[in-house]
Image (tube, coloured by chain):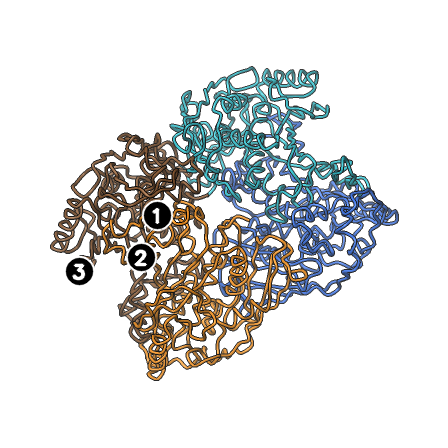
Chain colours: A blue, B cyan, C brown, D orange
């Protein structure tokens, strides 16, 4: 049991391996009568799709989902919604050595232990970033539904390789090829990516996401809070190793009098003067924007030689990876974070 | 639906409000025949119990659980295990104003919106830190079972008020009243707490937790990974606003060649030379210690005057909180983090 | 994992053994602001309580629940609702032999195999009919909420010892000590019970339940249909060995043209001329009454000598049971079936 | 939320409509390294496939699943297993009138209410018996795994149109085109089917299923017992309206001394002399065969004219159904019941 999200309203099953016939998803629990705009969805998927620019892997995939069921005349019909994306551009031979010599930072070794030699590690198998494509199919549909209800989910690159974009995040940057607010900072980030690529290396970063328009009162105390649910989904995105809400780790350095968000009245409504809570108190939204950041580790697949081990001979060996990889997955992960957040948030919304 | 943890093997239901008759828990899914050492459990609970020193609330509670069922002659009998802790030292009148004038940083306002005026906000109600007592009953029992199977779960204060204890965390500090490794750093932290208290203020901090002895291969890909499950439980602990595994947010600044943990052979076994992954790759343990840190915000209840609003008149007012509160909950939260982690980890273990 | 019902909206955790300190339940997921009439609940519980008449066990228990949390001023407050009932009138010594010599028809043997000798089999332990008391606490509250929303849940004795009450079931018989429609048939059933008791034996029966007022459109296709969910809860009631909806097993003998419920228009609304479907088509309510029947096996605890085995010596032996038991549990099971059905039905209702 | 089975170990998501591009399933939770014999699976699927004989619909479908992922070199690889079956032989125009004039006994009306006019009712949509094809893919694989572990799951026709096959069910009849034990009774059943077909009508029946080789101790008390879980899955099969275990409804007529299964010692092992309990006590297997029967209602689609209503004009009208349908689905439902039971049973087995 692993790849099925079981929420309050939704059940999302994600399937596929990097080099299997297809990857795909089944989304169960959507009400009937929701329009699904496939063109808008394709634009969303294109933001994640590989092979389109110099910071992503040269593996080019069209990422064009085929909907097998659940839609009728452009609307959901109440039955589960299933979409598959065929894997076209696969090169299984690139990966033949990995079951014997695991790549550091990848799941090759842990999967080998868990699946006792039967795993399909080709291209990373079920652990591949390719599985974020079906997550984006589900999340892209849900993000659009949320929008129609006045809830927007927007992410941006906050940092890459230690270079921060500290501009306030006030409007979507989804239209930009490199989704930062401050393009000057973006230029420095791109240079850092190119420099890492030139060295046969990779870089990581931080993505910030803001959910606006969520009314107060959404979420549950304790195990089913907004934070818990967002965390449960966000850590399903490969390479995410940290998550913080609002002031997050900085709050640990503050005093209560600084960290508490004082309430005020604005146009007859309760608001907070600051948003250190990231819009969530006691697991429940307070009507302020929900703000969180995730730490994305540098792509583990690098061209540089690395120390690994031969699992058959139990000897140490040098590993050189020859597949096609992103020197930085942060830009492509931005819509994935939006998709994951949309899934977590939608699941709490009343019909 | 909120206060029931539904795992692979365990179901934990936590109930109670700060000032209700009792708080308690039901743990369902433990095999029969497990010895439960109530004295050892009490020692664990005492680490969390309030009223024992100058950094915790003067509300003194014995935190002595009564087991209603599930135990027979000191062993689990296969039936659900239920324990209740009576709330003895309650002062409901302290809280009469809070439904009208919510405390910044607390769930008073979000609960009022969600529960439409019916919430029991006395003492924080179901959102109170008091609910971590039954979590510690469950977690304390599970921690002990894990220990018998060679898996230890140890947490320590890593930072308070920006003062860090950077000593390596190699052995339990559970025996210390103030659970740091570096007592000199601990002294500075205690001084910072006293200083905040003197100012009618509070401070936050960071707790680090290390799980040792977990074999490789534990956890699942995607939504049911070790990170997802730990996150789901840890964000149930009040005041936790951030979580990172291994290098966490620092990994975002590293290159892949630095962040990847190279494999090596030690005494015929596969190990990693570093542990930036925090012992988890692809959601699955790799045999290295599982390491994570949580950010704990400063206690929102402070004596200082704060800006709030009157929800009836929708006017801004000054709030002065008169209840009994901790100037810093980080020390008392250390065993709570161990309890939460034990719950998350045990749930994945094969019998 | 066993004694936690996980529904769409509700989570119900039932705990306790027949002779433990207490039995009880936690109901999580009720909205805040629901009035709970404890007097009405007590009347409902009294219908199940033992020791009140000549067909039930002489073990007399008050079945008076103590609510530990979740209520404030008579209304639900949004937090989990927990109630415990102390076990007063226990006689553990009656059961000392059962772990060695299991009672035919009871769970003594299966529990012994499963729990490896650690089970608390005293009084049937967690398998005892006593656990239906907390189920009735939860179900009694939910039944009342349903009533306020126009949905009634009523059960009656349909048959005991092969004697049927074939009168139409049009109004509640909850006020009767012996809940049949046709009192003449009831007299015969009572005589059959007394006859069995005189022989040191027991009898079984059939309970019919009707849910009226449920609007069309409630339920889900496939695994989460009304039938699936009712079944999941009803088979949790000890001694239930069969379940049928509408025409049920008789439908197997009919032709489609007889079994299909023709639609008609009554006062401008769609209705069906018959109700062989028991109000459910495709797992979803059709607006007709939901009708089902459960088969209740005869109480396995009988005074008559029975053949059993000694699990230590693996020899066949004669067993004589000396505890206090019901010669027929069907009358007391009537409110239990109402409680179980109320749980299953409420869980599907929109707020 | 509807079409996802969430068990202890497995999660099965079933998707598709009768006339959508495809139907299919994702099975999550199988261990890696399990051989999947696609030829054996196809033989199993052929037992359910339509269009092969005179009691089934003339709609002929090959029911040949394409596995998209989860298999590698004939073995499960630990990732979710997804298979799709294309819908080839669809005739959507047959169903154009059904959204306006619902077929009695079908889900047309309840789905219309629930999905507010957006349902895909063509061919029964997601409620079609066609959805049992992917259930058989999952169940067929699980049945084979159980077999390799010594657990067999066999079903047979017990009755059709009131004609019973009362021969003891001691060996699989899977090889027979018409799966009865007593072929003479079978002949009479076939005659009854032909007679109903000639009348433009249909007949129902009873299927009995026996699970042999299940060790004692499998299952959980209360909500997660063997009976509960089997019920949850079996009522997902369209047309099932009743379920009984062991003596079932007959037990209601027995005395305890007759219904209790006396224990004995056979070859040094505990057994029962009878099996009125159907192999289950307290929700847990007792080592005897698990025996249950399901009532299958007559196919609601009949050629005879029926009374229905026009949902637009709210007038009563006569309905004539012109699609292709089975005069009796009981024979084809036999492997479906085996598949459903295999799913329920496997989910409880330890690895």
Q: Which residue is mark 3?
A: C167
Determine if marks 3 and 1 fall on one subunit: no
Residue A214 falls left or right of residue C329: right
Q: Of the two numbered discs 2 and 1 on the same chain, state the one appearing first in sequence.
A: 2
Residue B212, label in figure = none
Q: Is residue B139 visible?
A: yes
Horizontal side, residue A111 vs residue C78: left or right: right
Can you tell which quarter of the image residue D203 is in?
bottom left
Residue D273 lies left or right of residue D351; in this view the side is: left
**Nearer to us in this view, D282 or C351:** D282
The tag on residue D264 is 1
Residue C187, horizontal then vertical, whole percent:
12, 51
Residue at 22% across, 42% down: C303
Secondary structure beneath disc 2?
Answer: helix
Q: Which residue is mark 2?
A: D248
Q: Position of residue C206 (x, y in %)?
A: 25, 55
Q: Is residue A159 above or below residue D84?
A: above
Give the SS element for disc 3: loop
């Amino acid at each position: 049991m692993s790849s099925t999200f079981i929420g309050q309203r939704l059940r999302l099953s994600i399937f596929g391996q990097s080099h299997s016939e297809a990857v795909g998803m089944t989304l169960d629990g959507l009400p009937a009568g929701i329009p699904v705009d496939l063109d808008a969805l394709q634009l969303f998927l294109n933001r994640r799709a590989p092979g389109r620019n110099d910071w992503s892997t040269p593996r080019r995939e069209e990422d064009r989902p085929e909907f097998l069921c659940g839609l009728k005349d452009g609307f959901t019909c109440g039955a589960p919604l299933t979409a598959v994306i065929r894997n076209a551009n696969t090169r299984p031979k690139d990966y033949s050595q990995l079951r014997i010599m695991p790549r550091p930072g990848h799941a090759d070794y842990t999967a080998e232990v868990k699946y006792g030699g039967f795993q399909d590690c080709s291209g990373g198998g079920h652990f591949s970033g390719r599985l974020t494509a079906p997550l984006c199919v589900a999340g892209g549909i849900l993000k659009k539904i949320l929008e129609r209800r006045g809830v927007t989910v927007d992410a941006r690159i906050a940092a890459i390789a230690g270079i921060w974009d500290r501009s306030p995040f006030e409007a979507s940057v989804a239209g930009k090829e490199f989704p930062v607010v401050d393009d000057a900072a973006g230029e420095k980030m791109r240079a850092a990516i190119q420099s890492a690529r030139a060295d046969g290396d990779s870089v990581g970063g931080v993505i910030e996401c803001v959910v606006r328009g969520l009314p107060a009162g959404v979420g549950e105390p304790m195990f089913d809070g907004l934070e818990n649910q967002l965390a449960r989904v966000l850590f399903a995105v490969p390479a995410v190793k940290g998550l913080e809400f609002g002031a997050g780790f900085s709050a640990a350095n503050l005093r209560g009098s600084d960290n508490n968000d004082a309430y005020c009245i604005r146009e007859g409504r309760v608001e907070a003067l600051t948003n250190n809570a990231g819009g969530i108190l006691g697991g429940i939204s307070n009507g302020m924007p929900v703000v969180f950041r995730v730490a994305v580790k540098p792509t583990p697949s690098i061209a540089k030689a690395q120390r690994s081990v031969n699992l058959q001979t139990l000897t140490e060996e040098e590993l050189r990876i020859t597949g096609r990889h992103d020197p930085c997955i942060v830009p492509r992960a931005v819509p994935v974070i939006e998709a994951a957040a949309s899934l977590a948030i939608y699941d709490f919304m009343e019909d």
